[in-house]
Amino acid sequence: MARTNFQWGLGSDIESQMSQEAIELVLYAENDSGCYNAYILPMLKACEKKYLRAQGDLTKMLNGFSRIACPIARQYMLEHGSMTDSWHSVFTVSVRREFAHYFARYFLSEFNSGNRFNTPKVGA
């Protein structure tokens, strides 16, 4: 069952506080190259542009990651779900929020450590 109220403290193990459905969705999004290249990477690049311009907003970032959780959840259910299960009953709103919090925190940790997602094109 999905947890609806979770708190992430600094330095805590994120995955130990996430529901199993959210962990499964995160793993699918990270390991499926189609989902990662179509949804996750463009969102990370957009967040990076905003933060480099000092226009970054955590609320908008969470909303963006919540929005891309829906098509990823649909794709997951097409590949791994049964015909009787609907994607929104398996991946509830709270699960998609956990997904968004995970990727927002991932972006902030990578950005603060100096790693960048927008690499310049070679020869440009």
Image: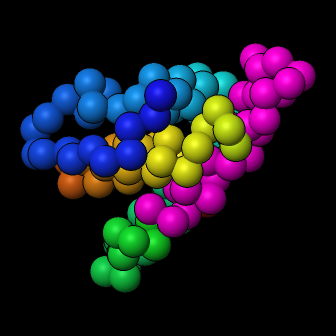
How far across and how far down the image is residue 34, in percent? 73, 33
Q: How is the image coloured?
A: rainbow
Q: Is residue 81 visible?
A: yes
Figure quadrant of the C terminus: bottom right
Q: Is residue 122 visible?
A: no
Single out the residue that lies furthest toward the right: 83
**Residue at horizontal 76 percent and vertical 17 percent from the top:** 80
Q: Main secondary structure of the magenta part?
A: helix
How far across and how far down the image is residue 20, in percent? 45, 23
Q: From the viewer's perspective, tell me whether residue 4 is left or right of residue 84.
A: left
Above or below: residue 57 compared with residue 41: below
State the residue in front, 124 or 35: 35
How far across and how far down the image is residue 108, in percent? 29, 54
Above or below: residue 22 compared with residue 50: above
**Residue at horizontal 31 percent and vertical 48 percent from the top:** 5
State the residue in front, 114 or 105: 105
Residue range in magenta is 62-87
Q: From the viewer's perspective, tell me whether residue 14 is left or right of residue 68.
A: left
Quadrant in the picture for residue 54:
bottom left
State the residue in front, 92 or 102: 92
Is residue 80 rendered magenta in the image? yes
| Number of marks drawn | 0
Above or below: residue 3 compared with residue 5: above
How far across and how far down the image is residue 84, in percent? 86, 24
**Residue at horizontal 51 percent and vertical 66 percent from the top:** 63
State the residue in front, 61 or 107: 61
**Residue at horizontal 62 percent and vertical 59 percent from the top:** 67
Quadrant in the picture for residue 73:
top right
Is residue 100 rendered magenta in the image? no
